[in-house]
Amino acid sequence: MTLDELEIKCKGCTACELCNGRTNLVFGVGKKDADIMLIGEGPGENEDLQGQPFVGRSGQLLDKFLDSVDLSRNKNVYIANMVKCRPPKNRDPKPEEQEQCIKWLREQFKIIKPKIVICVGRISAQRLIDKDFRVTKQHGEFIDKNGTLFMGTYHPAAILRNPNNKELAFGDWLKVRDKIEELGIEI
Ligand code: URA
């Protein structure tokens, strides 16, 4: 199956109650065979309205970080979320919602085959790296999982709330750039 075919299937998903509140399902965006994949938490209001991940204020900050290390959703990364439909009032996605939705993410992984996965924020890091992941303690650390490198970093929304974390987050993105170089990944 291609990513486009998977997206069409996914758009009909009614596996959890989040489907009832969606304007648009937010499948993901970017290079279809990207070596670098980013996983956020779930769509917010702007994302739900536009059907694209990270298009609000958080997204603008994320794009700035990406741009600073020569990465871009238009060129060399793929961006998706743990859940594809907006949780009401931007609450955290429930474990059972994540459990249903991760099936789509697994299919996306299989098709895209990223070499590096960046978990943007606590929710995806705790589901994909370590259930007790602490962003403040473990951000910027690469972990090899079956040949794919996973790293967790600050969510841009957390940085907008606490700008003191901006430098630390920027440091993580510099580490991504170094890792890309170390592995000889062409971006
Ligand atoms: N926050 C996320 O985690 N994902 C989005 O797509 C937008 C905001």
Image: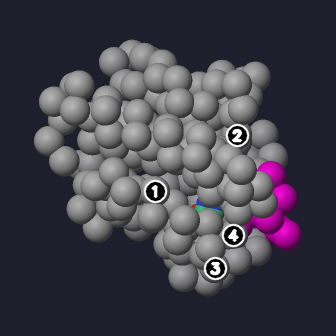
User: Which mark, residue 122?
Assistant: 2
The type of residue carrying mark 1 is Phe
The type of residue carrying mark 2 is Arg
Highlighted range, magenta: 85-92
Q: Is residue 101 left or right of residue 187?
A: right
Circle 1 residue? 65
Distance, label 2 to label 1, CA atoms, is 18 Å
- Nearer-N-terminus badge (2/1): 1
Within-10-Å neighbours for mark 1: few <14, some 14–19, many 20+: many
Magenta-drawn stretch contains 4 = no
Circle 4 residue? 44
Distance, label 4 to label 2, CA atoms, is 16 Å
- Nearer-N-terminus badge (3/1): 3
User: Which mark, residue 142?
Assistant: none
Circle 3 residue? 46
Quadrant of the displayed image that contains ligand 1? bottom right
